[in-house]
């Protein structure tokens, strides 16, 4: 379900907060001392959840099997994160001229939250295990077993070349999608791709390495951040990458989402977290320019 998993991870983190095991304002090193290596000692839990930790750019290439639960618990991903140095775009500023530290942690956010969660949970469980045993909403998983994998429908991908042709094709020639070249241009302007401003140009040059640096390696094949094929592989689906690789049904997601809409109460009346914790999840909203995406975005902790 791609980034829907970010909300799932945030809900699990909220449950840890509600149980008194985690505090949003605490530094991550309070729960994970080794995280503080290489200049990360001042990063808070709130910074991670708000994409402001400077860890959007993963510097290392993982083996896809590192995401499996047993390997997670052997600190395969935790060790990788411990070695990372925070990286902030010094060209990213908000409308009022103040510097912005926000950069969309597309994949890394879920890994970091999972490492924090499994360290504070009294049974040292991962997000996937807490989902299965404590939340237990049918159709919501982070990491599938053989039985659940059989009930999962794989997704397919449309060729990027086909999409490009359709974007450029005039309607009178049988265009099959609504999105057109003008929408592409407007999006490029909004994103800053067509801007000649120095800050935008530098930002795109810095971000392009995210696309071309391999995130996973498996045997001789390398996978990149935006490579769609890795996200459909059995290996990644069996593992836990909460930010981009949770699995579930529409009904299950609706039930889980209702816990936030109903201030911590599930559809059957069970309380997953208190209203006080719900307030903490939504307090101190912060509008900032995203250094990766380039747009102003208001972030709650739950997103």
Image: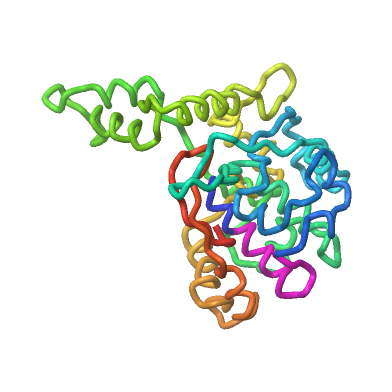
Residue 272 location, x and y as percent?
Answer: 64, 75
Q: Residue at x 69, y 63 (%)?
A: 13
Q: Quadrant of residue 207?
A: top right
Numbered-mark total: 0
Q: Magenta part mainly helix, strand or loop?
A: helix
Q: Residue at x 63, y 60 (%)?
A: 10
Which residue of the protein is positioned furthest toward the top in this rendering? 220
- Going by the picture, which residue comes out furthest to the left? 172
Q: Is residue 17 magenta?
A: yes
- Give the residue displayed 81% in from the left and 64% down from the top: 121
Q: Position of residue 215 (x, y in %)?
A: 67, 29
Nearer the observer, 105 or 131: 105
x and y percent of residue 190 in the render? 35, 37
Which residues make up the magenta segment? 8-24
In the rendered view of the protein, which quadrant contains the C terminus? bottom right
**Left or right for 274, reference 267:** right
Vertical relation: 276 (above or below) 188: below
The image position of residue 34, as x and y in percent, is: 88, 47
Location of residue 191 (image quadrant): top left
Tell me which residue sits at (81%, 43%) in the image.
Answer: 78
Residue 70 vertical placement versus 273 (above, below): above
């Amino acid at each position: 379900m791609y980034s829907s998993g970010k909300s799932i991870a945030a809900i699990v983190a909220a449950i840890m907060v509600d149980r008194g095991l985690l505090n949003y304002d605490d530094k991550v090193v309070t729960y994970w001392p080794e995280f503080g290596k290489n200049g990360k000692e001042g990063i808070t839990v709130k910074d991670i959840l708000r994409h402001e930790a400077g860890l959007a750019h993963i510097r290392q290439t993982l083996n896809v099997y590192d995401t499996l639960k047993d390997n997670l618990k052997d600190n395969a991903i935790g060790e990788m994160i411990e070695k990372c140095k925070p990286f902030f775009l010094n060209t990213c500023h908000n409308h009022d001229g103040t510097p912005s530290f926000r950069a969309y942690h597309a994949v890394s956010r879920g890994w970091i939250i999972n490492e924090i969660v499994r360290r504070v949970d009294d049974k040292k469980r991962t997000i996937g295990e807490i989902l299965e045993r404590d939340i237990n909403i049918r159709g919501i998983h982070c990491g599938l077993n053989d039985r659940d994998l059989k009930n999962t429908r794989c997704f397919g991908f449309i060729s990027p070349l086909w999409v490009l042709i359709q974007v450029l094709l005039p309607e009178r020639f049988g265009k099959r999608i609504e999105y057109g070249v003008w929408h592409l241009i407007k999006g490029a302007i909004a994103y800053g791709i067509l801007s000649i401003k120095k800050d935008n140009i530098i930002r795109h040059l810095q971000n392009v390495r995210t696309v071309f640096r391999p995130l996973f390696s498996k045997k001789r094949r390398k996978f990149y951040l935006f490579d769609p094929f890795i996200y459909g592989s059995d290996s990644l689906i069996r593992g836990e990458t909460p930010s981009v690789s949770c699995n579930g049904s529409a009904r299950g997601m609706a039930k889980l989402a209702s816990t936030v809409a109903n201030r911590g109460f599930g559809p059957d009346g069970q309380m997953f977290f208190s209203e006080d914790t719900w307030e903490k999840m939504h307090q101190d909203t912060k509008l900032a320019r995203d250094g990766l995406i380039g747009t102003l975005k208001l972030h709650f902790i739950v997103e």
